[in-house]
Amino acid sequence: MDLRHLHAFVAIVDAGGFARAAARLHLSQPALSRQVHALESELDLRLFDRRGRRVQLTGDGEDLLSRARRLLADVQAFSERARALRGGETGVLRVGATPQAIETLLAPFLRAHRRRHPGVEVTLVEDGGARLPGRLERGEVQLAQIPAGDARFSTRLLFPLYVLAVQPAARRARRPAVIEITALADTPLVLLRRDFGSRAWFDAACEIAHVRPRVVLESGAPHTVVALARTGHGIAVVPSNALLPSRGLDVVPVVHRGVPIGRWAGIAWDPRRALAPYAERFVTELVAHARRDYPGAEVTRRAPPLPRRPGEA
């Protein structure tokens, strides 16, 4: 069906006749009449009763008028949506992240992002850090907040992600800025499960330092291991993007021979799939946000800089 014919049909009704409609559409009256005849032939229906100079809708024309208006409005909306997508003004963006990243980084960022870009619908896909790279590779998400350095993906660095030791605050004049991993050798530890990235980094550092960790409890939630540490079950080991209570705890980065244990957090995408303009803008703004205010900054400010691995740029 030629949309010009539908435009002609609606224009004649709105203008109250062929002559006025032809003027509005910048067409000759015979050309407009041919468009209406073509539409009537295609539908095999009469849309107008033509009696002298008066033009009146038939019953079939009355029935189809509202549908023609809706169809033309939908076409207009479709065109405007496509134009907005081309300009990066609107779209649907799926972002994968861990619960910690959502709670401490994305939640405050998304509030401002939604105000700036109301046409972009951001869908958060929550999963464990070990499974997010697979989701990104399969195309289930367009972006994922994961540790940097995975050669499969393009990545922008967000913030340093330290491994922290958490225990009840001690009464001393000044707490140390860091704790050596060897100092944890004979200490009861409350750890996250092995599918957490920070647990994998801690275990790898223990192996390098020839430390056999004394694990008394494990949990799948950072706030749980922190609560256990607060009540004296042992020292909790958590990533620096965990949401920690502001009082009553000593929280310091874990180091091996003075070098912090951890990785840089990044926002990653699969280079095989082109990013839409709104996704590129999301990355740029998230990087700027993280550099101003990243999770754990107040705890790790006095710690040595976290070294960057190959591919972390």
Image: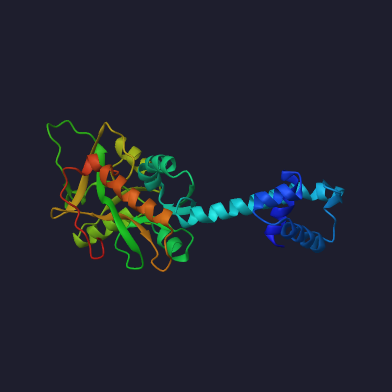
Quarter of the figure with the N terminus: bottom right
Q: How many marks?
A: 0
Front one among 243 and 179: 243
x, y percentage for residue 54? 83, 46
Front one among 211 and 72: 72
Quarter of the figure with the C terminus: bottom left
221 left or right of 158? right
Residue 162 seen in the current view: yes
x, y percentage for residue 73? 65, 49
118 left or right of 310? right
Instruction: Name the residue at 29% across, 63% down.
Output: 149
Above or below, 29 relative to 294: below
Instruction: Name the residue at 19% across, 33% down.
Output: 170
x, y percentage for residue 13? 75, 46
State the colouring used for the structure image. rainbow
Above or below, 31 relative to 63: below
307 left or right of 117? left
Instruction: Name the residue at 57% across, 55% down.
Output: 79
